[in-house]
Amino acid sequence: MQRLYQARDRIEAQLLLDFLDRHLVEAVILGDYLAGAAGGLPADIGPTLWLVEDDDLERGRELLSRFQADARRPSSTATWYCSGCEESVDGDFDVCWNCGQAREEAGS
């Protein structure tokens, strides 16, 4: 296993894990619950992503760079309304947070 990245929190770690999974890079999160021991441990105890296959390190680093660049980029996608429940959904999401309906493509 190869260490790829120490996330700032559980949410960032899970988002990156999901991103890697979508690109067929197997990874695990270790130290996920260490923040519960805050005060007795050093301040840099965020969850760490480890690549299962050593050969995935280069690809994992490329994907990490893409993930971080995407996180810094402001959204340019307009809010959309779910055809299933009429809920307003932020343009960065392709699935309705309220009912799980996938976004319909324009012109569909």
Image (cartoon, rainbow, N blue to C red):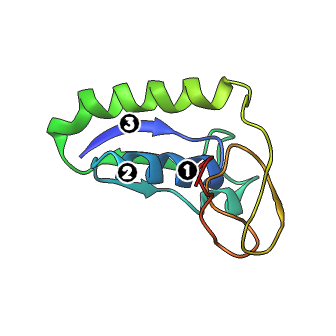
Q: Are marks 1 and 2 in contact (CB under 8 Å)?
A: no
Disc marking residue 4 = 3
Looking at the rendered structure, the secondary structure element under dot 3 is strand
State yes or no: discs 2 and 3 in contact (Cβ < 8 Å). Answer: no
First-in-chain label (1 vs 3): 3
**Cα–Cα span, label 1 and label 3:** 14 Å
The answer to which of marks 2 and 3 sits earlier in the sequence is: 3
**93 relative to 58 in the view: left or right:** right
Instruction: Check disc 1: other Cα within 10 Å, few if <14, some if 14-19, many if 20+.
Output: few
The residue at which mark 2 appears reads as 22
Out of 12 and 74, give the one closest to the viewer.
74
Q: Residue at x 17, y 40 (%)?
A: 54
Q: CA distance from mark 1 to mark 2?
A: 11 Å
Residue lying at the far left of the rendered structure: 55
Location of mark 1 (residue): 15
State the quadrant of the C terminus.
bottom right
Residue 89 rendering spot, x and y as whole percentages? 78, 55
